[in-house]
Image (cartoon, rainbow, N blue to C red):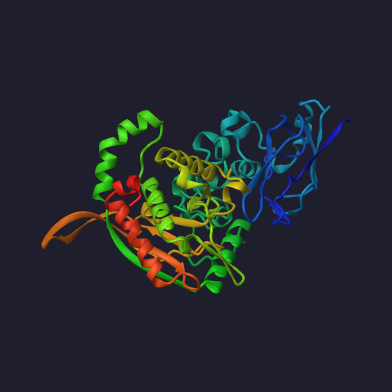
Amino acid sequence: MAIVEVKVPQLSESVADATLLQWKKRPGEAVAQDEIVIEVETDKVVLEVPAPAAGIIAQIIRQDGDTVIADEVIARIDTEAQASVSSKAQATPAASAPASAASTEPVSAKAMPSAAKLMDEKGISAAQLEGSGRDGRITKGDVLAVQSAKPAVATVSTTPLRAADKPALPEVKAAVNTSQSLDGRPEQRVPMSRLRARIAQRLLESQQTNAILTTFNEVNMQPVMELRSKYKDKFEKAHGARLGFMSFFVKAAVHALKKYPIVNASVDGNDVVYHGYFDIGIAVGSPRGLVVPVLRNVDQMSLADIENKIAEYGQKAKEGKLSLEDLTGGTFSISNGGVFGSMLSTPIINPPQSAILGVHATKERAVVENGQIVIRPMNYLAMSYDHRIIDGREAVLALVAIKEALEDPARLLLDL
């Protein structure tokens, strides 16, 4: 017997430990080299743990939900065992669903162990389900969602909803099948994920340590919309990227930060740190919570570079593959609540930054131009800032500079 150990990957210096999410393999199951066997959640990112060698899972040492540290052994793989051994070892209830359901399904529709057990108990076949897990795997939530369509089910799910039923920013560990919780007065207590707890901690720290004020303004988006409409097809053909609105907001923000460097600064004890670079954080909703990946040296990026990078971050956030490097740093942030329909909000500063821009939904509104009432596509902008180092004058003027750049995009080219 040749045993290879599966260990927790290296964590960043600021992360002491991590939490095991859910094993994708059980003892006795075959695993290929580099196949992902479990995900490890830190308070910043989720790391995938691949199998270091092909073989059979001989032992799982640490279970789902356990707290682990870097380099800790969490499982062992027998590299010399034959794949047929798995048929004997799979005597656990989760993997023993008899000749139905998951065992006859293709790999892309294979059920998770807990889902296979529930399918067997409830007499639900894989043909009735559409897997919402990674690689189309059927989760316990998928089974419960189908079960909820049947009469009078009294239980409440503690597992994720189907993808089609999830809210815009679902919490993986706290997702509740609300279709089953409307009968009676049920309650459910679930622990925060490490990422959600970290988000809560940082936002609370921001409120407690910053003197936050918010200034508002409105911007006529018609010039940007006309520019985008005129060139979007040529832009996509030339650069292979869709021309969106966020790249304009990013460029306009950098334009304002150059004029008012204090808005791009941060507080370090009794010192003010002025940054000679522009790293812009873009708030992105992910299945595990709000994350803020950072665009680096934005002043040196083209609109196409920005659009491509934002699209890349969005996909990585959706798949849970953002790295620590993607989320580290940043001198200023932009939060776009408009994609969810928000009309107005007061964004919270992302420490240790000193300001954040809130972008909202663009709606046609009646405005006065040259004494006449006209209809224009208007967007309300909000800038929250740390009043300890940023005076109202600088904050207001910086937001006005963003407004002027968007209403006259030529300013961005002429640096006016």
How many numbered callouts?
0
Q: Quadrant of the N terminus?
A: top right
In the foreground, 354 or 379: 354
Residue positioned 66% across, 37% down in the render: 97
Q: Is residue 88 visible?
A: yes
Give residue 34's position: percent from left, percent from top. 70, 32
Give residue 328's position: percent from left, percent from top. 59, 52
Q: Is residue 167 above or below residue 234?
A: below
Residue positioned 33% across, 61% down in the render: 400
In the foreground, 9 or 389: 389
In the foreground, 404 or 212: 404
In the foreground, 118 or 15: 15
Q: Is residue 182 visible?
A: no
Q: Is residue 210 left or right of residue 218?
A: right
Q: Is residue 98 above or below residue 396?
A: above
Residue 322: image quadrant is: top right
Residue 200: image quadrant is: bottom right
What residue occupies the far right of the structure in this picture?
Answer: 1
Give residue 233's position: percent from left, percent from top. 31, 32
Give residue 148's position: percent from left, percent from top. 48, 50
